Image: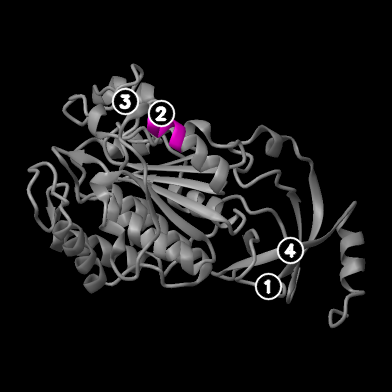
Amino acid sequence: MATIDEIILRHSRRGMPLLAQHLPAGACQRAAEALLACPRGLVTLITGFPVGPAAETDGPPGTYFLGLGLQQLGFQVLVATDRLCRGFFDHEPGLAAEYLPLEREAAVRACQAFLQERNPVALVAVERCGRDATGTYRNMHGHDISSRTAPLDELFLQAAPETLTIGIGDGGNEIGMGGLRDVIRSELKLSPCVVPADHLLVATVSSWGALGLLACLGQLTGRQLLPGATAHRAFLEHIVSRGAVAAPRGEPALEVDGFDLSVELDILESLEEASMTLEPPLDLPPEVHHPGYHIRRMRMPHCARGPERCTACQETPEEVCLLQLHPPGSGLAARPIIQVGDDPRWWEYEILGTFDSQAEAESYLHQLPGTS
């Protein structure tokens, strides 16, 4: 069976599989794990890409359903976009949306105020154009679209270090592609976005990437978060009725990036099938566990970005930790997750204590009620 990362790259036309080769294996799952490790605060979703005087149909669908899924997982969700997407997220059930100004100086000030007032725990951009090395926003043809693109990448550039950032794109000019700018410039011959993200997901269609991330979130939490075909079609019809157009034609149609609805629904079905299985993470250390508890040698995380992105996380020493699996309030509080043994599910945990040795941890474990 194809993996989630493979499914979102089907029917590729723009060289995204080439970029995927430069990303860590299991990029969708890594991004999902990072999101689940965040405190249950505000996640800001950023979307909206101009095609002529309107916004295109790619981006908002994936953003909308990702937002609904994050709400089910206990996060607050707010969409940040501009007036080209006005009314898109009023679809029932609606998502709160804030429309930032198109004018550059006003938008920069608005982004600064947004971060100070809202303090998001994570930023996720889905098909949102980011600036190139000259500060210009360009479409896939290299045309300057700065006058129709609010500089919402300022949110990424000014975000606090502890704020998780995820970029999802399908061309090379979207927020998050900055980490692969040299590859995009040399291999795809494009003027790339220079704004990076902690996690980058690439897909044939950006909304497919957002749905892939949603599939992984459901997979890791044991929930069905993906929308059905009827809900997906209804949202696409809604945004077209509000003025969205299908790229590259720039006409109102139930299409996304040249793919008709039947292809969209096939991708959705494949993601649902793939989310029924979960491959264990690579290089799991030896472990000892008791029902409800777990002893593991691990690094205490400094922040949600993890050791791959955070120097402070890399420098934390390994310790023998006693974990309580499924603690009181499980599923409601902000906790990390871990896979235990051969169990195909992932478990929430709290750290009960750290010890100098496994023997000390086991001795403490056997003193707990019901573990003798």
Mark 2 and mark 3 in contact (Cβ < 8 Å)?
yes
Location of residue 310 (image quadrant): top right
Mark 2 and mark 1 in contact (Cβ < 8 Å)?
no
Where 138 sits versus 233, above or below? above
What amino acid type should be assigned to the residue bearing mark 1? Answer: His
The kind of secondary structure element at disc 2 is helix
Q: Which residue is mark 1?
A: 326
Q: Which residue is mark 4?
A: 350
The kind of secondary structure element at disc 4 is strand
Residue at 73 percent across and 63 percent down: it is 350
- Residue 108 lies in the magenta-colored region: yes
Q: Which residue is mark 3?
A: 192
Q: Which residue is mark 2?
A: 178
Horizontal side, residue 284 vs residue 196: left or right: right
Q: CA distance from mark 3 to mark 1?
A: 44 Å
Find residue 62 and report its horizontal and vertical position in percent.
Answer: 31, 56
Secondary structure, magenta segment, majority class: helix
What amino acid type should be assigned to the residue bearing mark 2? Answer: Gly
Residue at 14 percent across and 44 percent down: it is 247
Location of residue 262 (image quadrant): bottom left
